[in-house]
Image: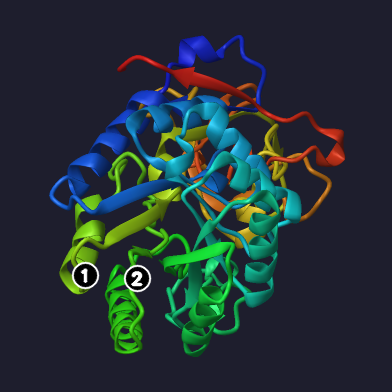
Amino acid sequence: MSNVFPIGSFASLKTPFYHYDLPLLSQTLSAIHTAIAPHHNFQVHYAIKANANPVILQTIARSGLGADCVSGGEIEAALYAGFPAEKIVFAGVGKADWEIELALRAGIACFNVESLPELEVINACALAMGRVANVAFRVNPNVDAHTHAKITTGLNENKFGIAMEDLLPAIRRAAEMQGVRYVGMHFHIGSQILELDVFDRLSERINQLQDELEAAGIHTSSINVGGGLGIDYAEPDAHPIPAFADYFGRFAHHLRLRAGQQLHFELGRSVVAQCGTLISRALYVKHGHTKDFLIIDAGFTELIRPAMYGSSHAIQNLTAAVGSAEAVYDVVGPICESSDVFGKDVTLAEAHRGDLIALRSAGAYGEVMASTYNCRRLPQSHFTFADK
């Protein structure tokens, strides 16, 4: 991996902190716009749950993407960052009344509804406020995303969405209500998907549902296929920008959209993961009887993905000179938990106390999931604004 960080500016910063490469984020956003340009009915919403840093949100909002929110707090953050309300969609399996009312007051584009009880509450809230809420039903297509069990969402065993066979009755129930308006179907089968053919199968399920709804005389104005596109955690410098053209092209090829129908996407990880890096400092090199440990000052309080998902991030010694001798370490944090491990048997340039250690591809589900466990302070952020 090449050293692409402004090391000199890091010397005075208190570690651990997040560094964001905003030029790379801008290049990624440009790649998305280029990939969807031939498809005038494609609309992309950024999934705020991936990273809600205000500077990141403002950059994405200025680029013209919409926002996918899963809480009232995310709706507030989206509006504050400059996302237009008419480009905001509200998903989530457990929307509280105050969150629904907030979204109604703001005039968001659509609620992605996950159950009939939720539909009833949205209808009641809308009637009480004199509003009509656009709703799309989140459908569980029972498509295996071939990803980690904790981030798959499209199987019948998952808590999300309604079953395909329940869709038609749900739409008919919505038609009986005065406070909601059915506009579409919503899908999301999982995250960090690298086998893109699963999106072909998702498209086939959607085609099947569209045919069934049309046979029942039901018009659907929008389809939302969620997100899930994965990134290269192993070689972030080799693949800093995901294959957006292939991703969008699969839906363009396999999905039979009707005239005037809008296709929505909710991308998170693929937008922000590669622009973010967790910068830490080596505290100690501990020589054990069977292995060596590199103990750094970042822990799962700053980046919980390895402990929660068993995920792997490329790790780099930024301080070491090119061609330095290498050593093998278990890279661990200071948290008083055995799961606070970033990588086992990791080959790095030989580390010494005070070296800057980078955990790459941490722009998604890193800072946003940070905690104060062990009474630790939340990490700060540092940005590269100009091209390197």
Residue behind mark 1? 258
Residue type (three-letter) at the residue carrying disc 1:
Arg
Callout 1 secondary element = loop
- Disc sitting over residue 309 in the figure: none
Residue behind mark 2? 220
Q: Residues within 10 Å of mark 2 (few under 14, many from 20)?
A: some
**Quarter of the rendering occupied by the N terminus:** top left
Q: Are marks 1 and 2 in contact (CB under 8 Å)?
A: yes
Residue 293 seen: no
Compared with residue 151, is residue 315 higher up or lower down, i.e. above or below? Answer: above
Q: Residues within 10 Å of mark 1 (few under 14, many from 20)?
A: few
Would you say 306 lies left or right of 272 here?
A: right
The residue drawn where x is 81% and y is 32% is: 376
Residue 354 position by quadrant? top right
The residue drawn where x is 78% and y is 28% is: 377
Would you say 86 lies left or right of 160 here?
A: left
Residue type (three-letter) at the residue carrying disc 2:
Thr
